Image: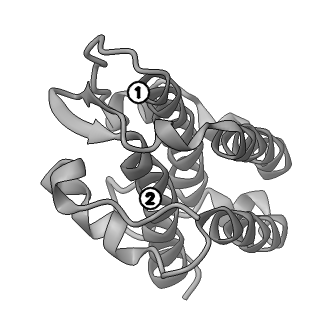
Amino acid sequence: MLKRPSVEDYPEYYRGYVGLVPEGDLVCIIEEQQKVIEELISSLSDIQANHRYAPGKWSLKEVFGHMIDAERIMSYRLLRIARGDQTPLAGFNEDFFVENADFYKRSMTDLLEEYMTVRQSTLALVRGLPEESWDRKGIANEKVTSASALVYIIAGHELHHLNIMKDRYLE
């Protein structure tokens, strides 16, 4: 079972995400998240998914697309760091990614399929990493991050946005 990373294992701006992750088997938690997201997203129409809770805010569809993009990027960082690659990894501008993704043109069914594929890939990576990988550290977005912290960041990022979806879009 993967242990919760110490605060020295990841940048301070991720503390909120890591803090959202409950105690327990992280693989089981991530699998359960997938079920929750699948149920929630499959119940939404494209009209609901294009809703913005305020002017200038992302639509629910864009939030979901951002979640997919972020998980893909964090999983890539996890792969590189877990394999011992010490090459500094660049950050990314989430607003730029959303602006250039045209999520509004895609159906929620299509986005859900992509999410499921990305999540299954993340789970396969996590399950296949050797134990000694978890303590490896690398540089991502100019900050030291451990492989184990990245898995918690992935889970916490999803919980953060799931809470936003429920509180601001699906009231």
Q: Split into 4 quadrants, where in the image is the N terminus?
A: bottom right
As helix, strand or loop, the secondary structure at mark 2 comes to helix
Which residue is at 85% across, 49% downward? Answer: 109
- Separation of marks 1 and 2 at Cα, in angstroms: 14 Å
Left or right of 170 on screen, residue 22: left
Residue picked out by circle 2: 152
Q: Position of residue 171 (x, y in %)?
A: 54, 88
- Residue 17, quarter of picture: bottom left
Q: In the picture shown, does residue 45 fall above or below 126?
A: below
Q: Position of residue 129 (x, y in %)?
A: 62, 37
Colour mode of the rendering: one colour
Q: Earlier in the sequence, mark 1 or mark 2?
A: 1
The total number of labels drawn is: 2
Left or right of 15 on screen, residue 99: right
- Residue 126, quarter of picture: top right
Q: In the picture shown, does residue 1 fall above or below 83?
A: below
- Residue 10: which disc? none
Check disc 2 and give the amino acid type. Answer: Tyr
Front-most of residues 128 and 55: 128
Which residue is at 78% across, 50% downward? Answer: 112
As helix, strand or loop, the secondary structure at mark 1 comes to helix
Left or right of 59 on screen, residue 126: right
Residue picked out by circle 1: 81
Q: Position of residue 64 (x, y in %)?
A: 59, 53
Check disc 1 and give the amino acid type. Answer: Ile
Which of discs 1 and 2 lies nearer the camera? The answer is 1
Front-most of residues 158 and 32: 32
Pointers 1 and 2 in contact (C-beta within 8 Å)? no
Residue furthest front in the image: 132
Q: Position of residue 7 (x, y in %)?
A: 19, 61
Left or right of 132 on screen, residue 103: right
